[in-house]
Image (cartoon, rainbow, N blue to C red):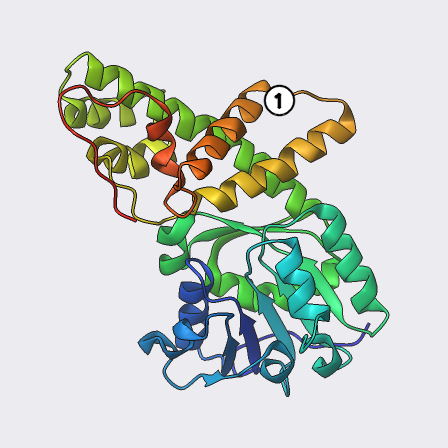
């Protein structure tokens, strides 16, 4: 398959400018990539960090004259719509171009996208990321790649801008499989932090001091370090949307089901998230798992939508 490395000065299209996609695009712009951008709401296209980028009205328009397309959209249906739907990008993608899909979707969808694109001499890698909005802004995301080695190497200059570490696990779909494992770990760690915070509050301990102490020991985790304060404040500004994590856990549970494996902790968190979504909390941060447990009895609850 022909193609060239996506080095800076190579025109690049970015579709999906959400909590992760926008700071990723801003970092690519700062690194010297001439960007063409599109997002469903159109609002983030005018972000000051994208000053100078060309804002396109549709996926098919945004990829014209570009050698690479970076996707960061919400789910399987969004990826399929962006690539193959009405005004989808594929008809305007040039042979030899490369699609880097940073969305979190099912491995089977990634493989189907790669196969259909290969028929047009277009390469595809799945490259879901982890590290939260903090990592997206800092350019330190962990990137989990699946695809042909040659395609991953072509994408590496882009991936090195958005990520602090890049890992290639094998064929297309393997990055998504690793991301599913990541989300299982996130589920357990967030739920454990929520339970620990609830217990400490009910024991009337000085919880900020407790968290500071425990972060340094065996119980330390990303969730404890970065999300305990939101749980203590009972205020959940968006970092990673609870509804999206719920979708990701569904992918992990489906993968487990296909192997005959039961994941009881993941299933429990999946059910907790569903209850929170039913209560209208799907669009807040996943740390709202704290809301699955009894409130701090010593103060009233509040939440920022």
Q: Is residue 186 visible?
A: no
Name the residue: 31% across, 77% down: 48
Q: Position of residue 282 (x, y in %)?
A: 43, 43
Question: Is residue 291 at all visible to an observer of this figure?
Answer: yes
> Residue 173, position in %: x, y?
72, 48
Q: Quadrant of the image for the N terminus?
A: bottom right
Q: Which residue is mark 1?
A: 263
68 shown above or below 222: below
Q: Nearer the viewer, residue 236 or 110?
A: 236
Q: How many marks?
A: 1
Residue drawn at point x = 54 percent, y = 83 percent: 57
Dot 1: within a 10 Å radius of its alpha carbon, few (fewer than 14), some, or many (20 or more) residues? few
Q: Residue at x 35, y 75 (%)?
A: 47
> Where on the picture, by quarter, is residue 279?
top left
Farthest right residue in view: 119
Q: Is 267 displayed left or right of 93 in the figure?
A: left
Pick whichever, 218 or 104, lies toward us. Answer: 104
Q: Residue furthest front?
A: 279
- In the displayed structure, 99 sits above or below 273; it is below
Q: Is residue 30 left or right of residue 144?
A: left
Helix, strand or loop at label 1? It is: loop
Instruction: Say which quarter of the image contains residue 10.
Output: bottom right
Image point 42% across, 54% down: which residue?
A: 140
Residue 126, image x, y percentages: 66, 55
């Amino acid at each position: 398959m022909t193609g060239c490395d996506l080095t800076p000065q190579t025109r690049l299209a970015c579709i999906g400018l959400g909590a992760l996609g926008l700071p990723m695009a801003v970092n690519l712009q700062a690194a010297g990539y001439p960007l063409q951008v599109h997002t469903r709401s159109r609002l983030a296209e005018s972000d000051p960090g994208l000053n100078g980028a060309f804002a396109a009205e549709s996926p098919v328009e945004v990829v014209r004259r570009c050698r690479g397309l970076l996707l960061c959209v919400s789910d399987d249906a969004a990826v399929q719509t962006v690539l193959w739907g009405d005004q989808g990008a594929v008809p305007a993608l040039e042979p030899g171009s490369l699609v880097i899909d940073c969305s979190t979707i099912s491995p089977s969808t990634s493989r189907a996208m790669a196969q259909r694109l290969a028929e047009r001499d277009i390469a595809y890698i799945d490259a879901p990321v982890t590290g939260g909005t903090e990592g997206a802004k800092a350019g330190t995301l962990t990137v989990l790649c699946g695809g042909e080695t040659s395609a991953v190497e072509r994408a590496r200059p882009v991936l090195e801008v958005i990520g602090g570490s890049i890992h290639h696990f094998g064929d297309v779909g393997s990055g998504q499989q690793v991301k599913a494992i990541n989300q299982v770990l996130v589920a357990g760690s967030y739920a454990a932090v929520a339970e620990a915070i609830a217990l400490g509050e009910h024991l009337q301990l000085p919880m900020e001091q407790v968290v500071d102490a425990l972060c340094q020991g065996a119980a330390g985790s990303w969730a404890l370090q970065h999300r305990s304060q939101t749980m203590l404040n009972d205020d959940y500004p968006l970092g990673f949307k609870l509804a999206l994590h719920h979708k990701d856990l569904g992918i992990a549970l489906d993968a487990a089901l296909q192997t005959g494996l039961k994941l009881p902790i993941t299933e429990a968190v999946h059910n907790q998230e569903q209850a929170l979504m039913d209560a209208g909390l799907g669009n807040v941060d996943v740390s709202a798992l704290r809301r699955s447990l009894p409130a701090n009895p010593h103060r009233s609850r509040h939440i920022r939508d």
